[in-house]
């Protein structure tokens, strides 16, 4: 990968275990050994570093021990899940200096989440344990193997993990047996292979740099015009937009290859029809002309095979999805809006899965972004003006332009198709009435055969590229953004504005998902 740091393969590790431990040094070494075993579960990665996020309630004992060991690894992060408010939670801390230890670790966390109130303390701990299992890739438990240690205890968390088929490493609290690995559903190896393939893509560093400088200059101008702090824009440009432009270049590359390959497939298939008609009508005795048709059909099959082999279509739509997430990330980071792994609504379930590599890659990237300082109330108006001008209005113009461009292309190809079908009608009619001699009659018959084949190929290109549907989608998207822009202008403070920023991101995400549903079934195929 050139120019940017590779997005790491981030493994979220949930932890659970006893509050009272013996021989902590031994248990810490076992945890370190488990981390190496987790790395070995992944496929060989050429360009992708592995990093851990530990998800923990930071209870006394095992939770904190494992958090400290994991945070000692390169690129590690801590997410805290609180079963109740911090002050209430601290009432259960009984070990010496426990409160200070908790606050020290809590200060190192990237983010924290407090669960909603529970009817009892034991239920609160149980919910925290279930949340940990539901949101981790692997669970590590330091456990004595005994059942029935109370609601929310280690045994209950381990049992829930087994029910959910969560991969589990069980370290014996007494150290009398080797650590056990229960693979459960396993780790999605394909996700990390696809991420590594993305990180390994070659992109011209100078081209990324040129686009980055041009866009950052434009954003800084908009920031000056709206009074938004230039420092925030500059820092976020460096952190986010280099990834956006790299991914955008890759998406455009594979879109171009996919479209060109599709055009070649239809052109070669039409050429095969024309060759067969030409031989039959003009040179029936030249059987070797059939070899040309064989070569053309063979070329069609080779292009289709190569397209599937190299995943041109899949890379195009995956990279486009990720690029659009990076585009939004710039403005989400500036606004200090928190982002979670998206889950598609049911009507868009064919678009993507929360386990897809693009989601994993984006969340890993997002976790690595530095946190900007909070906004003051006086910054609200400038933030609103900048977001509206640099993001929302920019996207409105983009979709309006895209709608017009796709509509023009659809009409152009439709007109050409109509002309060709008119030519087919004229040629067939003139041949029927016997106009001209034998040669002209054969020429008219040739045109009557080949013209509809050419028209059908152009129609297939028009359908394959979904010009009309994409034009209508962009037109609707521009309308939705216009309505959202009006609501954003009416927001009077950060508390009412930031949910609208999140809504804008959600609208763009769903539009992207809808686009994926449209194009994902347009892979290269031999014309039939």
Image (cartoon, rainbow, N blue to C red):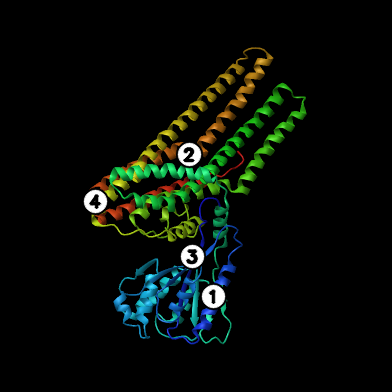
In front of the other: 464 or 378: 378
* Disc on the earlier residue, 2 or 4: 2
> Are discs 3 and 4 less than 8 Å apart at CB?
no
Picture quarter with the C terminus = top right
Q: Please, what secondary structure does the residue beneath circle 4 have? A: loop
Q: Residues within 10 Å of mark 2 (few under 14, many from 20)?
A: some
* Disc on the earlier residue, 1 or 4: 1
Q: Residues within 10 Å of mark 3 (few under 14, many from 20)?
A: some
Tell me which corner region of the image, top left, top right, bottom left or bottom right, holds residue 394: top left
In this orientation, does residue 69 appear?
Answer: yes
In this rendering, the answer to whether 131 lies above or below 341 is: below
* Disc on the earlier residue, 3 or 2: 3
Please give the residue where the numbered disc 1 appears in the rendered image: 32
In this rendering, the answer to whether 245 lies above or below 452 is: below
Please give the residue where the numbered disc 4 appears in the rendered image: 491
Please give the residue where the numbered disc 3 appears in the rendered image: 75
Q: Please, what secondary structure does the residue beneath circle 1 have? A: helix
Separation of marks 1 and 4 at Cα, in angstroms: 50 Å
Please give the residue where the numbered disc 2 appears in the rendered image: 466
In front of the other: 229 or 484: 229
> Are discs 2 and 1 less than 8 Å apart at CB?
no
* Disc on the earlier residue, 3 or 4: 3
């Amino acid at each position: 990968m050139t120019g940017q740091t590779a997005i790491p393969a981030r493994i979220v590790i949930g932890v659970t275990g006893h509050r009272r431990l013996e021989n902590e040094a031994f248990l810490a070494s076992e945890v370190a050994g488990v981390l190496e075993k987790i790395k070995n579960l992944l496929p060989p990665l050429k360009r992708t570093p592995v990093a851990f996020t530990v998800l923990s309630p930071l209870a006394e004992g095992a939770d904190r021990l494992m958090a400290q060991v994991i945070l000692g690894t390169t690129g590690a992060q801590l997410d805290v899940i609180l079963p109740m408010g911090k002050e209430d939670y601290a009432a259960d801390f009984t070990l010496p200096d426990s409160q200070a230890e908790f606050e020290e670790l809590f200060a190192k966390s990237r983010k924290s989440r407090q669960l909603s109130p529970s009817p009892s303390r034991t239920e609160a701990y149980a919910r925290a344990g279930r949340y940990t299992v539901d949101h981790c890739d692997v669970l590590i438990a330091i456990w004595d193997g005994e059942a029935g240690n109370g609601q929310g205890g280690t045994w209950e968390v381990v049992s829930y993990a087994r029910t959910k088929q969560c991969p589990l490493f069980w370290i014996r609290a007494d150290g009398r047996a080797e650590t056990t690995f229960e693979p459960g559903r396993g780790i999605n190896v394909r996700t990390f292979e696809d991420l590594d393939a993305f990180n390994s893509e070659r992109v011209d560093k100078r081209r990324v740099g040129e686009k980055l400088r041009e866009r950052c200059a434009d954003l800084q101008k908009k920031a000056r015009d709206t009074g938004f702090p230039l420092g925030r824009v500059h820092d976020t440009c460096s952190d986010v937009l280099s990834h956006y432009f790299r991914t955008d270049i890759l998406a455009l590359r594979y879109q171009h290859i996919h479209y060109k390959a599709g055009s070649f497939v239809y052109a070669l298939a039409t050429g095969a029809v024309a060759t067969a008609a030409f031989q039959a009508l003009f040179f029936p005795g030249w059987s070797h002309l059939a070899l040309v048709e064989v070569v053309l059909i063979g070329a069609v099959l080779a292009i289709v095979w190569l397209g599937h082999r190299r995943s041109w279509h899949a890379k195009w739509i995956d990279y486009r999805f990720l690029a659009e997430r990076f585009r939004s990330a710039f403005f989400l980071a500036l606004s200090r809006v928190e982002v979670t792994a998206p889950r598609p609504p049911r009507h868009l379930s064919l678009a993507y899965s929360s386990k897809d590599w693009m989601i994993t890659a984006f969340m890993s990237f997002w976790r690595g972004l530095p946190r900007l300082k909070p906004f003051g109330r006086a910054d609200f108006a400038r933030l609103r003006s900048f977001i509206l001008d640099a993001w929302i209005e920019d996207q409105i113009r983009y979709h309006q332009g895209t709608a017009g461009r796709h509509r023009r292309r659809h009409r152009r190809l439709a007109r050409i198709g109509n002309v060709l079908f008119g030519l087919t009608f004229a040629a067939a009619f003139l041949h029927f009435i016997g106009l001209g001699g034998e040669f002209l009659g054969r020429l008219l018959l040739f045109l009557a055969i080949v013209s509809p084949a050419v028209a059908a190929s152009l129609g297939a290109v028009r359908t394959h590229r979904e010009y009309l549907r994409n034009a209508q989608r962009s037109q609707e998207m521009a309308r939705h953004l216009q309505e959202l822009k009006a609501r954003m202008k009416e927001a009077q403070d950060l508390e009412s504005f930031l949910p609208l920023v999140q809504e804008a991101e959600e609208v763009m995400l769903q539009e992207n998902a809808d686009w994926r549903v449209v194009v994902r079934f347009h892979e290269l195929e031999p014309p039939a």
